[in-house]
Amino acid sequence: MGPVDLRTGLQPGGTGRRIGSAADFDAWVAERSAADPAEPFTFVVGTDGVLRLAPRRSEHVACAGGGPVLSAGEIAFGRDAGRWVVDHVSNHSTGYCPDTGSWPAVARALDQVGLEHPSGFTHEVVFRRCPGCREHNIVREDHFVCVFCHTALPEVWNVDPSA
């Protein structure tokens, strides 16, 4: 959903590191400083159900190589009883504008890696496309009104017309 110029020159397979197992996650963590994994990272869950991680300021579209995703957002890890766990996870991605209902795909990808995680997004972002001007909106405080043209926004997620 993001700017067209972001989709030019994308790397096949994306820039995100594929994390399909506990061993993949352990190798990824080993490449970082002790404080680094506690910082939020960009993530996507590809249509293959696999988690991909990239530095926080990375574009989600680049992380995924421009392809479709099941979910996207930001994620942070912490230590609990000597093991890595998910501390925070959101669906905040203006490149994909995922619905809050995309959580089960994230949970399955994290379960596949063996990472303990919350029961849902710790911060949910509500995205809607305006039926009037077609702009993307972030709905705040349940105020379903387009910030650009003041048209009422639908209660149901409508960002991807093909979904």
Image: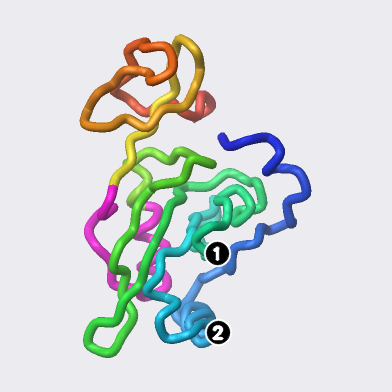
Residue assigned mark 1: 54
* Disc 2 residue crowd, few under 14, some 14–19, many 20+, Cα 10 Å: few
Question: Residue at 52% across / 71% down in the picture?
Answer: 19
Residue 3 placement, left or right of 23: right
Quadrant of res 146: top left
In the image, 64 versus 70, the foreground residue is 64
- The kind of residue tagged 1 is Ala
Picture coordinates of residue 131 (x, y %)? 44, 13
- Res 110 seen here: yes
Q: Earlier in the sequence, mark 1 or mark 2?
A: 2
Quadrant of res 82: bottom left
In the image, 13 versus 58, the foreground residue is 58
Question: Residue at 76% across / 43% down in the picture?
Answer: 8
Residue 119 sits above or below residue 68 on the image: below
Residue assigned mark 2: 31
Picture coordinates of residue 25 (x, y %)? 48, 78
Picture coordinates of residue 135 (x, y %)? 49, 21
Residue 38 placement, left or right of 69: left
Query: Dot 2 lies on which element?
Result: loop
Query: Dot 1 lies on which element?
Result: strand
Question: Residue at 28% across / 72% down in the picture?
Answer: 116
Question: Residue at 31% across / 75% down in the picture?
Answer: 85
For the record, the magenta segment spans 105-123
For the N terminus, the quadrant is: top right
- The kind of residue tagged 2 is Glu
